[in-house]
Amino acid sequence: MHTKFKILMLVRHGQSTGNVDQPTHDHASIPLTALGEEQAKKLSARIDVRPDLIVASSFRRAQQTAEPLREKFPDVPVEIWPDTAEFTYLSPARCQGTRRTERLPWVKAYWQKQDPRYCDGAGAETFYDLVTRARLVLQRVEERPEERVMLFSHGQFISCLLDIARHPYATDGERMAIFRSLPELENTGLVYLLLPQHE
């Protein structure tokens, strides 16, 4: 079987209201700030190579970030992949209406558990769930015919994709132990990942 490579371009969404400590009510509907919208426009302006496929997560802030590039390349197919959404590890019910700084003690407690199978409550994911999603997304991209795929997603999900690509044989426990120390992309940060393409 012949193997060639494709480029997966990973973009973290622009600055969102959650990033600047405004109250959030529904994790999926958090919008970009005015600065985030400007960041998305600047990102689109500096992308001069046409992607073969634009993918965005089902979360509003990722789709808003992708919009200027969609307008720049209107003939490029666009798909929404819900499984590229951000890692929701805290129970959405108790996070309703809270600010990022208010959630910090819960965040700290979650990561201190170091349990990949721990679930914080209804609607929350385990770390195992995140890794499973990320593996499936990488596999899907590898199997797609497009050679240049641009994915608009989220900081923790992108970190997980990159960690799996770099350390494919790490256990979930090993991955979780170092996960919070991985460098996080800035808003509208762009990373290129080379993946095999099987034919």
Image (spheres, rainbow, N blue to C red):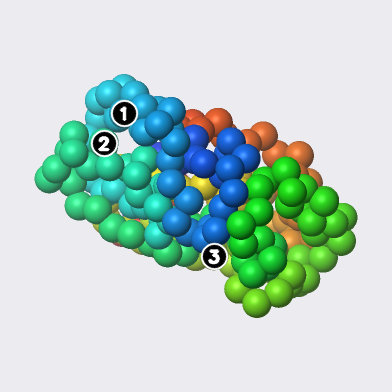
- What is the CA distance from the residue labelled 1 to the residue labelled 2? 6 Å
In-front residue for pair 164/75: 75
SS type, badge 1: helix
**Upstream in sequence: badge 2 or badge 3:** 2
Asked whether the residues under the numbered discs 1 and 2 touch, taking CB atoms below 8 Å apart as contact, a structural biologist would say yes
Residue 40, horizontal then vertical, whole percent? 36, 32
- Residue farthest along the bottom direction in this orientation: 122
In the picture, residue 43 is in which quadrant? top left
Q: Is residue 37 left or right of residue 132?
A: left
Residue 174 visible in rendering: no
Q: Quadrant of residue 198?
A: bottom left
Q: Quadrant of the N terminus?
A: bottom left
Q: Quadrant of the C terminus?
A: bottom left
Q: CA distance from mark 1 to mark 3?
A: 29 Å
Q: Callout 2, which amino acid?
A: Pro
Left or right: 157 in relation to 4: right
Identify the disc placed on residue 41: 1
Q: Which mark is residue 133?
A: 3
In the displayed structure, 131 sits above or below 15; it is below
Q: Which residue matches tag 2?
A: 68
Element assignment for label 3:
helix
Tag 2 secondary structure: helix
Horizontal and vertical percent position of residue 5: 38, 44
Q: Nearer the viewer, residue 124 or 138?
A: 124
Q: Nearer the viewer, mark 1 or mark 3?
A: 1
Identity of the residue drawn at 82% across and 65% down: 115
Rendered view: 73 above or below 93: above
> Residue 41 lies in what quarter of the image?
top left
Task: Say which amino acid is labelled 3.
Answer: Arg
